[in-house]
Amino acid sequence: MNVPFLDLGAAHDELRADIDAAYARVTGSGRYLLGPELEAFEEEFAAYCSARHCAGVGSGLDALTLALRALGVGPGDEVIVPAHTFIATWLAVSATGARPVPVEPDESTFVLSPCLLEAAFTPRVRAVVVVHLYGHPVDLDAVRAVADRHGVPVVEDAAQAHGARYKGRRVGSGQVAAFSFYPGKNLGALGDGGAVVTDDADLAERVRLLRNYGSCDKYDHLVQGFNSRLDEFQAAVLRVKLPHLDEWNARRARIAHRYTEALAGLPDLVLPSVEPWATSAWHLYVVRTRHRDALRQRLAAAGVETLVHYPVPVHRSGAYKGTEEACRAGALPVAERLAGEVLSLPVGPHLREDGVEAVAATVRNAMEELLRAGRARTGSR
Ligand SMILES: *Cc1c(COP(=O)(O)O)cnc(C)c1O
């Protein structure tokens, strides 16, 4: 048996003819940046998210950074971030010169816990970044209620949640959201890409300035900008994939439900839970167990590829070594525990049914074996 974590080749095969046609359209057009494909994709993706504006940029990290810059975040400011996330969320804050202030996750949904938000506020906090981690949306209304009291905007890091819904609304239909089109995301390009989605026309315009050297008209540089543009080829590929996103997310959801059904009732294995108001995009199916490393080893031996998102909490990484954030290490016990216990099972839209059954059976057998071995060691029955 050989079950890859994510089969991007199969995803490409399904759409090969359309992607080849898109490629040919761009190569022959003579327009490779800031052209008609980008414009069309921006319109289509904004509509998909039920938002008014979309600005394509070079990556998800840039989408977050430019959104924060466009909101006026800079040196001396603080930005609240989840403790449990991919490092890009923190790096975007640091890139503006501001300081990330971490908040612990909820133990069952893994996303930022709104009830801990209030305590993280200081007079220097200028924004809250929430992450719809693993595809599960954050409780946006609860977060916004706290942020509104402090008069700061909420930025959604939706890099793992294209198509996820909060109370029926697609994520990205709020104040401002950053998406990544890294190949492995639910909507992935054939290279790097990202987008800022917002209803705020001025904010969208500022992101458009920032992504293009601070200029709207050539050589008229209004602000010190970046070079971060979603190129025509990636935009054309994303236009081919976008109409398939809901169907691919539905396949992920079917796999997730099958795992949840097949793995229920195993002691020491915590399955992902979904809030009643949430529709997850199931970017990842993440289980928790204190036998994580042993389980992972057994799965690997049986040909099942798994990943860990993420093995080192951001505040423990070398990138934040010696910073004030790192000193909070002891103060973030939930993030620390999760880093040692989470395991992501394959949940890609091109994982076949026999693969799903094989993964579930292998996890079940391995866990039962590990539990038996544990009981034998402690002498209990
Ligand atoms: C992937 C990811 C990013 C960064 O996206 P890139 O396109 O790789 O720069 C940011 N935040 C989260 C939560 C991500 O998963």
Image (cartoon, grey):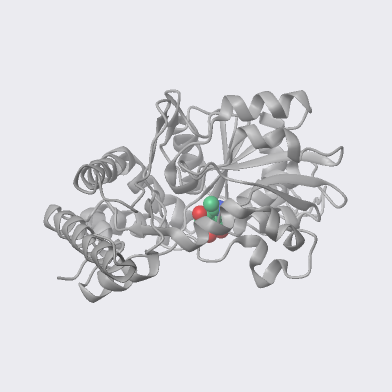
Residue 322 coordinates in the image, percent (x, y): 78, 69
Residue at 53% over, 41% down: 106
Q: Nearer the viewer, residue 52 or 171?
A: 171
User: Total marks drawn?
Assistant: 0
Residue 284 coordinates in the image, percent (x, y): 38, 51
Q: Is residue 121 left or right of residue 66?
A: right
Image vertical order of residue 110 relative to residue 316, above or below: above
Indicate which quadrant contains ligand 1.
bottom right
Q: Quadrant of residue 52?
A: top right
Image vertical order of residue 60 relative to residue 170, above or below: below
- Whether residue 306 is visible: yes
Residue 145 coordinates in the image, percent (x, y): 67, 23
Residue at 21% over, 57% down: 364
Q: Nearer the viewer, residue 19 or 47?
A: 47
Q: Quadrant of residue 358?
A: bottom left
Residue 228 coordinates in the image, percent (x, y): 63, 57
Image vertical order of residue 272 relative to residue 11, above or below: above
Q: Image quadrant for the C terminus?
A: bottom left
- Whether residue 31 is visible: no
Q: Image quadrant for the N terminus?
A: bottom left
Q: Nearer the viewer, residue 112 or 377?
A: 377
Residue at 61% over, 54% down: 333
